[in-house]
Image: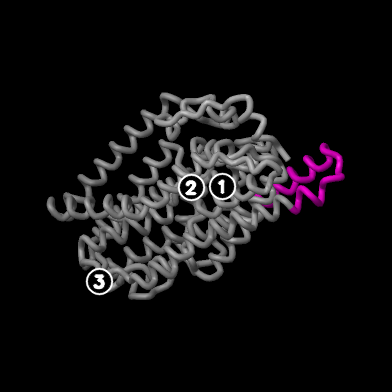
Amino acid sequence: MHNTFLLALVVVVAVGFDFTNGFHDTANAVAPSIATGALKPRAAVLLSSVLNVVGALISLKVAATVASGIVSQGDIILPVVFAGLIGAIAWNVTTWYFAIPSSSSHALIGGVVGAMMAHAGASSVLWGGLVGKVLAPSIAAPVFALVIAALATTMSRRLTKKSHDATKSWGMRAGQIGSSSLLSIAHGTNDAQKTMGVITLALIANGTLVANASTPMWVVLLCGIAIGLGTYIGGWRVIRTMGQGFTRLSPTQGFASQITSSAVILTSSHFGMPLSTTYVATGSILGSGIGTKKRSVRWSLAGRVGLAWLITLPCAGACGAVSFYCARLMGYSLGVVVVGVVLALYCLFIFLRSRRDKINASNVNDRWGAHSEAFQRSTAIAETPKDQDELVAV
């Protein structure tokens, strides 16, 4: 059934999600480079935003998976896509406020799956694709990245043991610029394509495209630009958690973690897996901390982030399902507008709350605990001199 107004609204909301994906996941590519001083904060996000757009144009395999491998195209309708996007955006802005490096990819997939189940039941979800292409890689990839980054950090430290500290530091920082660039391209090839897949799904649901159609070029360009602009805004709260929260990154650790993340993400994009770049980048950073002499990692913070990962799919799915039920209750034409306005007001509320303790390019590298870290408030960590000594550069 054709509904031009609803289709246009879905595309707008999808672009909005892609924008939040950009600023929420900026940390994946730039946090290590900013934390070690390899790049100035603004220069880092500018470089990453440009290369995210480049990455979005390289491949469409992930977009095809999202469009056809998660839910049944024959059962999809536009309000389902709309509600799924609403659930994903709501979860993204919530986790951004609490500075949690959660998965925008899983938020999107969870939102769509939840809305689809509310509309057509569990049989409309392609569970084989969900498990094989989403859940299984999300478990294996961060563990794999952690192990590889730990080994890479250990090897780099040993190979450069006799090098002069200043020379080693300069070389690793230079290497970080290249690895950060590669990681930004990898992020674009994986994350921007998920929104392309959702918009393609909406076009199929509206009858604009036939089933299993390829993603139109205007969708590719639109999504690439949206994620690039979001990246340039800079999700400073999450960048701070990734760059300062888990471990104190040295240039050696930063280089090893970024190279590892790039390799894993590009490999997953090649095989069409909508992998969570956040999970991979976090695993790599934790692995780089394990690879240091004193294995300096804040495991309590890592555990809380891991808990957030576990509830991302069900929480985003619940938001998507509730959004769909509300839209259907009020009639789709009116309901989607009302639900969209509610989301806009919620985003405004979160933004105003975040201004109470503003994190930006000027203070993103302050010592962990120097700000009232939103995600740490319930269990504040006061670093003792001993803690400070354990978090040393290698």
Amino acid at the residue labelled 1 = Ser
Quadrant into which the C terminus falls = top right
273 vs 14, left or right, is right
Q: Helix, strand or loop at disc 2?
A: helix
Answer above or below: position of 64 versus 318. Answer: below
Residue 223 picture location, percent across and down: 46, 55
359 vs 352, left or right, is right
Kindly identify which residue carries mark 3.
123
Residues tagged 2 and 3 counted as in contact (Cβ below 8 A): no
Residue 64 picture location, percent across and down: 44, 69
Residue 233 picture location, percent across and down: 50, 39
Kindly identify which residue carries mark 2.
22
Residues tagged 1 and 2 counted as in contact (Cβ below 8 A): yes
> Which labelled disc corresponds to residue 213?
none
Answer above or below: position of 363 versus 71. Answer: above
Between discs 1 and 2, the one toward the N terminus: 2
Numbered range of the magenta stretch: 155-180
Closer to the camera, 67 or 126? 126
Closer to the camera, 159 or 290? 290
Q: Helix, strand or loop at disc 1?
A: helix
Which of the two marks, 2 or 3, is nearer to us in this view?
A: 3
Amino acid at the residue labelled 3 = Ser
Residue 379 picture location, percent across and down: 43, 31
Which of the two marks, 1 or 3, is nearer to us in this view?
A: 3
| Residue at horizontal 70 percent and vertical 54 percent from the top | 152
Amino acid at the residue labelled 2 = Gly
